[in-house]
Image (cartoon, rainbow, N blue to C red):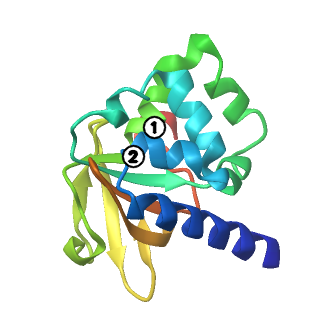
Amino acid sequence: MKKINLTILSTIFTLFLFSANAQTISALASQADDLSTLNAAIKAAGLEETLKGDGPFTVFAPTNEAFEALPDGVLESLLKPENKDKLVAVLTYHVVGGKVMSSDLKDGSMAKTVEGNDVNIKVGPKVKINDATVVKADINADNGVVHIVDTVILPPSLQ
């Protein structure tokens, strides 16, 4: 548990430092150690330039530990070139068009993802996006906002 907390704190600190200098979502993800798996997946899916674009985007960014928690072989399979469409679906299911700050979220609401399906939003003691808990919210970027989550959420087509 201590390792998880230190890793998350390290990511938050890194993102805070970089967001103070306002960068794109792609740049923020590439510079946070605990988002290296997400960054590799973004590159493998060919979405790096998109996340450097004007946006605005809201990204629910899974940590490395979130990717590691996927069932054995799932991540490796998604990263294969022949599964690029599935990888794109997973990643775009973590993106909402527009800049959605935590103060904009309402309990029980739904948000349409770039992938095309909705995610469920639960606001309580903790904010949840489907089964993922937001561990750090409102990290500003030039082209949107990043919320760090502890779980990779899968679109309905891959569940």
The type of residue carrying mark 1 is Leu
Residue that badge 2 annotates: 25
Could you say whether the residue bearing mark 1 is in a helix, strand or loop? Answer: helix
Q: Is residue 83 left or right of residue 37?
A: left
On the image, which quarter does residue 60 sit in?
Answer: bottom left
Quadrant where the image shows the N terminus: bottom right
Q: Earlier in the sequence, mark 2 or mark 1?
A: 2
Q: Nearer the viewer, residue 54 or 74?
A: 54
Q: Can residue 117 be seen in this view?
A: yes
On the image, the x and y values in percent for residue 49 come to 37, 26
Residue that badge 1 annotates: 91
On the image, the x and y values in percent for residue 151 come to 58, 58
User: What residue is at 50 percent from the left and 35 percent from the top?
Assistant: 158
- Mark whose residue sits in front, 2 or 1: 2
9 versus 58 height, above or below: below
Q: In this view, does 97 lie to the left or right of 134?
A: left
